[in-house]
Image (cartoon, rainbow, N blue to C red):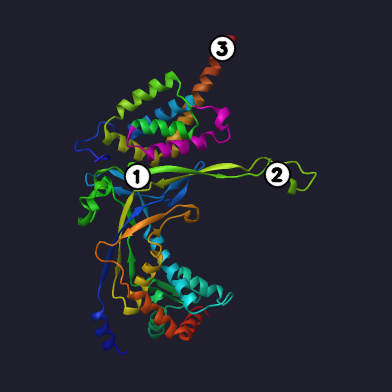
Amino acid sequence: MTTTELAQTCVTLPQQTIPWTLTAVAPIHHGSGTAGNTALLRTQEIVLPDGTQTAVPFVSGNSIRHAIRDALAWRLVRTLGVAEGGLTKGAVDLLWSGGALTKTGSQVELDQARRWTELVPALGLLGYSAQSDIVTGALRADNLNLICVENRWRLPAYLAEHPHAGLPAGRFRGEVFGTRHDVAGTGVDILVASGMVQPTSTQMIYEHQVLLPGAALWGGLYLDAATPTAQDALHAALTDITAAGTVQVGAKRSAGFGTCLATFPAGGIDPAAAARHTAHLQAHGDAILAAIGEATA
Amino acid sequence: MSTSTDTPPDLSDADLADLAVDVLDAVLSSASTDVIGVSHWWDRATSALVSAAAAGTYWPRVMSTLAAKLQIDTYGERDSRALLALGARLSDPAVLGRWSYIAQRDAPYIVAMCRIRRADRTATRTAATKKDAG
């Protein structure tokens, strides 16, 4: 593609904004260290319009990007029928974590980068590091911010009248506890080697700060000059991560946390994009795997 | 808005941190080392302060969260009166919101100051007891 042709193509690439709102139907824990036996909720310090400071919980845009990257990686390997042991560690890192720099140098091989990002849409969508290049993706993902009075000054207009917009963030925070169960003193003791003194119990209670079910968060996904394949990739990923009718964010998802209802006030997901994305993967399977191999060689 | 005021606040950030030390001191006086143990006493105090402050939209909830986190079934009478008085100073939602923010943000400092205060008080009492005995 010549520079002129590329410029013409770029002119046709639209900017796309996908606002979304998530309402927790299970507690959300997005962690940031501990205090004692309590895992703390991640918070963002903000300055209010009157100059005072406060801190509000949020879910990072980085974790949303990871959810999208994870969905696209699984869709790729499933569509291409990648067998157990079929990927190098570098390939797995590229697909699930965005790769790593493995060579020195400062020259970006544009043609090669364009070919990889077009063949592997997730790379064009989310960006990646490979060989000596760091390539920016087309997607920008907002943090998911809590709808609360402290955030009222930055709420989008469509949420200005949300019933939570006048309530303090603390109203949506709580704690839940879990127990690591120690089977000592139960019938399982019969399996423990004889002659051994039972050590101190390992039973313990742990606690997590959470956003309570019912809390609502908002954010946005933005595409800058995304190619059609990258646009389809985003919509395919959103299709996958909302396939159950809910979306999961934050940590402890395997233990009942993080489930949210997602709404897309501006229309949301293109229902045909996932099929187009899959068709692209099927049509270029060998070339895709070869490109991944090149990028991680 | 719960964490801002239109007029300059009467209580400075340092005042609010001192109030948090007072609160924690009173709460710990109702807690028991037999229940939560000596080795995790200050970890648990930090955790309780941070958790209670995070829930800090309503003083009764702050006090109740502190009690739950430190396994206090009932506050002693003297500590209850102290906490009631402290809560009165934090009755304005905007002030309570600022207190909550500072108590979370500066929890390690607040716990350290409380620890020093309680250690000094114990030392003073011990010295007085020895003096009386002598």
Q: Which residues are magenta?
A: B31-58
Residue B56, image x, y percentages: 35, 37
Chain on which label 3 sits: B
| Quadrant of the image occupied by residue A86 | bottom right
Residue visible at 51% across and 81% down? Answer: A293
Estimate the spatial distance between the alpha carbons at disc 2 and disc 3, rounded to whole Å: 57 Å
Is there a contact, CB below 8 Å, between mark 3 and mark 1? no
Q: Name the residue beneath numbered marker 1.
A: A172
| Quadrant of the image occupied by residue A169 | top left
For the residue labelled by badge 3, is the local secondary structure a helix, a strand or a loop? helix
Q: Name the residue beneath numbered marker 2.
A: A187
Extreme-bottom residue of the structure:
A2
Q: Name the residue beneath numbered marker 3.
A: B131
The amino acid sitting under disc 2 is Gly
Residue visible at 45% across and 39% down? Answer: B108
**Badge 2, how many Cα within 10 Å: few under 14, some, many 20+?**
few
The amino acid sitting under disc 1 is Phe
- Up the image or down, A58 lies above or below A97; here it is above
For the residue labelled by badge 2, is the local secondary structure a helix, a strand or a loop? helix
Residue visible at 67% across and 40% down? Answer: A200
